[in-house]
Structure formats: structure tokens, C-alpha cells
Amino acid sequence: MLKTPGVSVVIATYNRARYIAETLDSVIGQTYQDFEVIVVDDGSTDDTRGIVERYHPRIDYIYQNNRGPSAARNLGVRRARGAWVAIQDSDDLSTPNHLSALYGYAQEHPNCGMVFGNGAYLGGVEHNRKTIIPPSKGRRLAARGVRLDDLFDKSIVRLQAGLIAKAAYDAVGGHDESLRICMDLDLAFRLFMNFSISYLDEVVFLYRKHEGNTGRNEEGRLTENIRVIEKLLAGYPVAEKLLGPEKVARRLAYRHYRLAKSRWKRQQTESAREALSAALALCPRNLKYRLYQTGWMLARH
């Protein structure tokens, strides 16, 4: 009988033959070694299978027809035997201390549903900082704990930096398979509303920016972000009280406004006006939105 590992590392991938070997090497090279690795190939058409199979039997490889990253992750977690799950992307790198740091914290805090750390940029400084979460915010999160508005204001949770209790993942229903971009934020919201979430102020992964990043799809990112927020409010009415109705309205309105500008640039004028109207319905006194609405109305003539 196989020994049950402490952690199951789940990696969903799609056409990442260029990067996945480096990702797998970074995972296998962990200082903590009591883990299994499950790679779910979501219908790749490149040489992903051939590269991953070189790591057999250290890695469990599963192939499925393309159903999206959320479905691939859910399949991987269903196969996981560990009590804790680390969900990794197939183009980023784990630091050697990734699992030792997070699993060490989880062992000391067994009631925690998820613990997550920070990430650095593989290519160097981005947005005038070295880490994804600014140092001052990281210290604050570690000192006072994670609040809902921390997740709401900025999407600070990267699952590549996290360790999730499998029981917690299963309890909230795993990833929403209808989402392909903002699924991490959605999962973080649901975990927060049901379990304790902690932050460990340590860099545990390196984020690789490239043209294939799903977040570069602005239309998809903004529309899914709006959906995820509306889903949070519908599923957990107390969330609006915790955040404050004005903050919720501002966040949603700004997302609709960004969506409107993006559509206008692509000459999708009617859908741009619709998005701007949605922003104004949420924040009717916003002068900037009013000015854009007036300008776009005049553009019809």
C-alpha cells in the first residue's frame, strides 16, 4: 500500500511544453519531500505529454479533453491523497522552501483552511516592486490577519503561493468550472467565508509573465471579476455588510467602467455604452463616468 503523502501538488497545464519542465524541476527540488505530484493535461496539442512522462513514476500524469483550468484542477484534487493541496501553475516556479514553509505553518494551525504566502516576479521588478504583495501590506497581513476587504480590494491571493486543506476545498465545492480567469479569487472568497485563512510573509513562488498569461484577456478578466463579486454577494449576503455597500458599488462600477473603455477602443460602441450605464447605475454621482457618457452620446451624432 502506498504511503499517504502530507501534500498533494496539483498542476493543471495546457500547451506549456516550453515551461513545464522548469516548473516540475522546481517542485521536485523542494526541501520538504513528503508530497505527490499530479499533472492534469487539459487537452494539450504540443509536446506537454512527452515532457511530463519523462518524470514518471515521480509524477502522476492525467490527460483530459480541454475543459478549462478549473475542471483540470478539480480532477487533480479528486485524485489527491494528501490532506493538504498545493495548486501550481505550469509556467511558474516554486521556491525551494515553498512546501516546507506553508506545510510547517499548516501543521501548527490545523484548523486553517488555507495559508498563502507571497510571490516574486521571475523577470525582475514589476510595477516598481519586487514582490506581488508589497512589503508593507505583507507585514500588515501577517501581523493582523487576513480580512475580506484584503481579498476584495486587490486580488492578493495567488494559488501558486497557497496550501489548502483538501477537506476545505471539497467542502466549498472546489473550483467553479464555468470560470477560466478569476477562479482563484472566487475560490478564495468561498474559503474565507467558511474557513480561517492565514498569510505567511515569505516568498514561495516566482511568477512568470508572458503573452500566454490568461489575465491578459482584459474582456474576460473584467467580466469574470464582476461575476465573481456578484456571486459572493448572492451566496453570502453578510459579505456586503462586512465590506460596506459603498465599497462594493465602487468596485463593481469601476470594473464596468474599465470594461466600457476597453470595448470602446475595440469599436464595440453599443456594448461599451451598456457597460458605462451599468457603472453609472452603481455610482450615479461619479463625474468621470458622467463625462464619458456625455462624450459617447455626442459621438453618435
Image: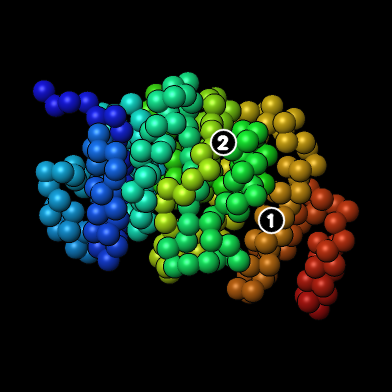
- Residue 256 marker: 1
Q: Which residue is mark 2?
A: 189
State the image coordinates of residue 103 (x, y, percent, origin top left). Answer: 38, 33
Who is closer to the viewer here, 128 or 267? 128
- For image coordinates 60% across by 51% down, the residue present is 135
Q: Quadrant of residue 51?
A: bottom left
- For image coordinates 36% across by 38% down, the residue present is 100
Say which element carries label 2: helix
Q: Quadrant of residue 268?
A: bottom right
- For image coordinates 59% across by 38% down, the residue present is 142
State the image coordinates of residue 74 (x, y, percent, origin top left). Answer: 35, 37
- For image coordinates 33% across by 26% down, the residue present is 83
Q: Quadrant of residue 73?
A: top left
Residue 46 shown left or right of residue 147 in the figure: left
* Marks 2 and 1 in Cβ contact (< 8 Å): no
Residue 21 shown left or right of residue 296 in the figure: left
If you read the primary sequence from the N terminus, does the residue marked by circle 2 or circle 1 appear first? 2
Say which element carries label 1: helix
Who is closer to the viewer here, 221 or 243? 243
Who is closer to the viewer here, 141 or 225? 141
Residue 108 shown left or right of residue 240 in the figure: left
Residue type pointed to by label 1: His
State the image coordinates of residue 209 (x, y, percent, origin top left). Answer: 44, 65
Q: Can residue 7 be spotted in the picture?
A: yes
